[in-house]
Every structure is written in structure tokens, then in C-alpha cells.
Image (cartoon, rainbow, N blue to C red):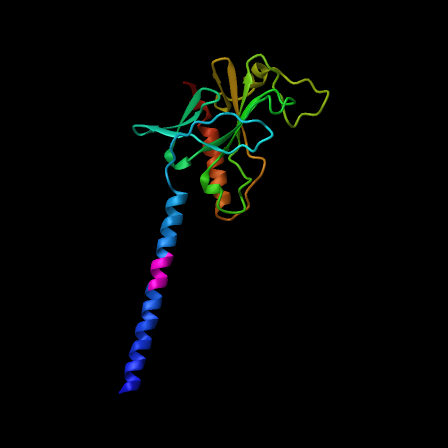
Amino acid sequence: MAHNQQSGFAALEAILVVVILLIVGGASWFVWHNKVNSPHTAVSSKAVQSSSPKLPTTAATNEGSTYYLRIAEWGVKIVYQQSLQLNYQFVDRSDFPEYPFDYVTLSTPRMTYSGCQSSTLGSYIRFKSGDAYYDLNNVKDVVDPTVKEYASKLASSDYVIAGDYYYFYRPPQTICNDPILGPVQAQGSAEAKAILPRLVAE
């Protein structure tokens, strides 16, 4: 009789351990899932000195059901889908005098949870209308066309003019090879390029 009572308690203890593990596992998954898919609010950002590290700016804001990527340093905004969750890192031309343009590197929080932290969704690049188009892949001693000449050879969806500036999209330099996040980068890059024509001055 005593042996049967001990067996009953052992089974009850095993069931209790399994239930506790399921609760802890479920709570952990819920916290992680909410962190990855949480909506972002606007955060104002100031350009910092090039000697200090720059953190991505979360710039998603919504007005009713419309979401915008606001790039405060440029005074522009772009309509986009909430699911894209874009962040950006601003790089002023004064930080890199050899590059005659400003740019923002685009990222998404969904890319930061694996070995793909250095992978981006590409960049938006801004040139003054009178500047030469500086091609990073260009060899020395080759004359760069003006921004206007360069843009005239592109499809209208490959650049946008807002105010006195031309804006272009440049694809990511590092490709994420993660089997799950690689497609996230590919889709996010395609969407980041596709929304460029929606860029307008504020």
C-alpha cells in the first residue's frame, strides 16, 4: 500500500515539473516574440561626432493608419508599411570628407537577433543637385557625371528629387546568409528600394 502511494507522488511530481517547464518556456517565447514584433515610436536624433559610435535611429511614426520613416536630419519622410519597421543611421558628409554626399544606412530590428547584425537593408544617399555623382565603385581618373546627368539615365523609380537634393537607393554591401533572416533582408531591401519614390520634404 505504501509503495503505491510513492508511485502516485512520483507521477504527480513529474507532471508538475513538465507543467512548470511549459509555463516558463511559453512565457520566454511570448517575451521574445513581442520584442521582435513590437511597434516603434519616433525618437529624435542628433548627429554625433564621428569619433563616437552612432546608434540606429528608430523613426517610425504613424498618423492614423499611415506610417512614415522620418529622417529628421534631412527634413524628409517616406510612407511605408508598418511591417517593415525601418531604423536608420545617419552619416553626414563632414564625417567622411572623401565622400561628397550624406547617407543613411537602413536596418530593421528583425536583423539584430542573429549573426546578421552587420547586414543592412541598404542605404539612401543624398546629393546636392549641382554635385558630381560619386560612384564608390568608380576607378580614379574617371570623370564622374553630374547628379542630374547620372539620374537622367535611370528609371524614374530609381531616384527622387526633393528640394535641392537628389536621393538614390544603394543596395546592402553585406548579405546575410542566415536561412531565416537572409530572406528578411532580401524582402526588406526590396521594400526599402520600392518606397524611395514616396520620399517627400516635410
Residue range corresponding to the magenta coloring: 20-25
| Vertical position of residue 106 compared to residue 197: above or below | below
> How many numbered discs?
0
Q: Main secondary structure of the magenta part?
A: helix
| Vertical position of residue 177 compared to residue 45: above or below | below
Location of residue 45 in the rendering, given as x and y in whole percent from the top left corner: 46, 27
Location of residue 56 in the rendering, given as x and y in whole percent from the top left corner: 49, 33
Which quarter of the rendered picture does the N terminus lie within?
Answer: bottom left
Residue at coordinates 35% horizontally, 67% vertically from top-left? 17
Q: Give yes or no for residue 145 being in the magenta stretch.
A: no
- Quadrant in which residue 149 is drawn: top right
| Vertical position of residue 86 compared to residue 126: above or below | below
Which quarter of the rendered picture does the C terminus lie within?
Answer: top left
Location of residue 184 in the rendering, given as x and y in whole percent from the top left corner: 47, 41
Q: Nearer the viewer, residue 148 or 99?
A: 99
Q: Is residue 80 left or right of residue 118?
A: left
Q: Which of 154 and 111 is in front in this view?
A: 111
Which residue in the rendered view is the most extreme toward the right? 141
Q: Which of 114 and 42 is in front in this view?
A: 42
| Vertical position of residue 165 compared to residue 25: above or below | above
Location of residue 139 in the rendering, given as x and y in whole percent from the top left corner: 70, 25
Q: Is residue 60 left or right of residue 125?
A: left
Which residue in the rendered view is the most extreme toward the bottom? 1
Residue at coordinates 32% horizontally, 70% vertically from top-left? 15
- Quadrant in which residue 144 is drawn: top right
